[in-house]
Amino acid sequence: MPLHSTNGLVPSADSTAASSFLVATILLVEDEPVTRTSMAARLKRLGHRVLEAGNGREALEVAGRERPDLIIVDWMMPEMDGPTFCESVRRDPTMKSIYILLMTSHDQPAQIAEGLARGADDFLSKAASKQEITARVLAGLRTGRLVRELEVTGAQLESSLVLLQTKQTEMEADLQSAATFVHSLLPQPGSPAPGLSLAWEYQPALTLGGDLFNVTAIDADHLGLYILDASGHGVAAALRSASLMTFLQVDNILRQIGSYDPEKVLREANRQFPLSAEGEYFTLWVGQIHLPTRMLSYASAGHHGVLLSPNERPSRWLTRPSSPLGFDQEAVFVSDQITLQPADRLFLLSDGIYEAASPTGEPWGRWRFQQAVEAQQHEALATTIAHCFTEARRWQAQREFLDDAAVVGLELSV
Amino acid sequence: METLAVFVLSEALDLADGDQELFLTLANLFMQESPKELAAARSALARQDARGLAEAAHKLKGSVLPICAPRLFERAQRLELLGRQGEFAEAASVCADVESCLAEVHAALRNAIAGGFPS
């Protein structure tokens, strides 16, 4: 609220409370000169700067130019009466929040209701005592100041919201670009090597997922495959996963280690990806298939999610107890070997799918996943994977997963 | 009506927050403006203009408040009401009252101004 000089008037002792609290510009609109002069003198005595107008039209012009903090307007005036003046002020966006006291001798409820409905904030009787005038003016100034503060706060909030929305849009675009990039790193469904077919489905909890996988040719005789799961999810997990994925690229592994031996890959990954300062870590399952013999070598660092589903036989999990990457620099990861048979299926999955919880909190569980896979043994690989997602979603009674959910299927031809 | 005072100087000064100069200004302004309102009321009455009569009486009534002239205030208030109701017969009589009350107030104000104020 602007502060003004006291127009050369020295506040009297009884106006000290007013002048020490709020000194404002007040527009007084009254056609009758004796009342106007009397009221103006009182307001000036309270320390306010007083602007005067003899009718509503003149007052609108003064109000538009001077933006008073408060307007006191008479009800009955020629040309434009008080209520019509109030309506005009309320219609003007630059003046609509100015506090208006309607001066009247009307004290009937219907007339008060009319005045309020047409834009007055309060009433002031022409016969009001000095104390009442002081109190109503101060109350009006306080309210007017609060309204203006609210308007400023509202405007600031609105501009902050626009800024946030712009930033949010930019961030979403960035996340989408990053997600597109990460997706470009994932294997193409189809045939990664002669006699093998690949299908997968991936549902990140957010735009960017922290669970990644790959199935890729190492050389003419070997196929490498892995699935990794970063603790946590969202952008930070996705960035860390992308970093591990870069490490796991065939060219890099062959350059650093000399082979895609799962045991050696895990040992080196364990060395290069220690537990982060925030306590974040990875679990990783790495496999290598020697294509001529269908020999699968595999090793796991705390990852439990690879299921072998042989044709016409019960499925089983390919894992052994081990710690996640980075927990122990001296950790030893042991490879196991198994010869795959024609029509065998391997499923690499992240815990987001089998930890999907029902509304009562019970996880879907690895054994339900196993049952879903076995029930679909004769369906196409992609159909089986889609079925697993359908069942998990049905279990959790919602479409979106709380954690990244990935299922990668690899099938040997008959 | 008879019990109401013509003019109460102490209350008028009190309404002017004890400011004698302000009271003098208001009194002079009143003596200058009130005849115009009386003339407007008479004119409205003559042409049987109810609204014009009520507005003129209302304005006069408003100007009396800071002067503190209870009898004139009461008559002006009555005239305004009769104007609103279109009761021209009674209004003519009340308008005559207003005129005589106004003359009394003017005389009282002139006396007060000439006689000085109580210290």
Image (cartoon, coloured by chain):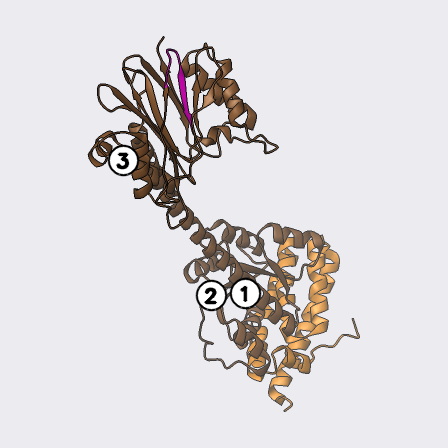
Amino acid marked by disc 1: Leu
Q: In x, y percent, where is residue B32?
A: 56, 73
Above or below for A311 versus A257: above
Q: Which residue is mark 3?
A: A246
Q: Quadrant of the C terminus of chain A?
A: top left
Quarter holding residue A317: top left
Q: Which mark is residue A141?
A: 1
Label located before the other in sequence (2 or 3)? 2
Which hue is chain B drawn in? orange
Q: Which mark is residue B48?
A: none
**Distance between mark 3 and mark 1 Cα atoms:** 66 Å
Residue A345 placement, left or right of A82: left
Above or below for B8 versus A238: below
Q: Which mark is residue A1?
A: 2
Mark 3 crowdedness (10 Å alpha carbons): few <14, some 14-19, many ≥20: some
Q: In x, y percent, where is residue A170?
A: 33, 41
Residue at x-position 35% and y-position 45%: A329
Pointer 1 chain: A
Residue at x-position 50% and y-position 23%: A369
Q: In x, y percent, where is residue A372?
A: 51, 18
Q: In x, y percent, where is residue B111?
A: 64, 85
Query: Judging from the image, what secondary structure is the residue with disc 1 in?
Result: helix
Amino acid marked by disc 3: Thr
Callout in the foreground (2, 3):
3
Asked whether disc 1 touches disc 2, contact meaning CB atoms under 8 Å apart, the reply is: yes
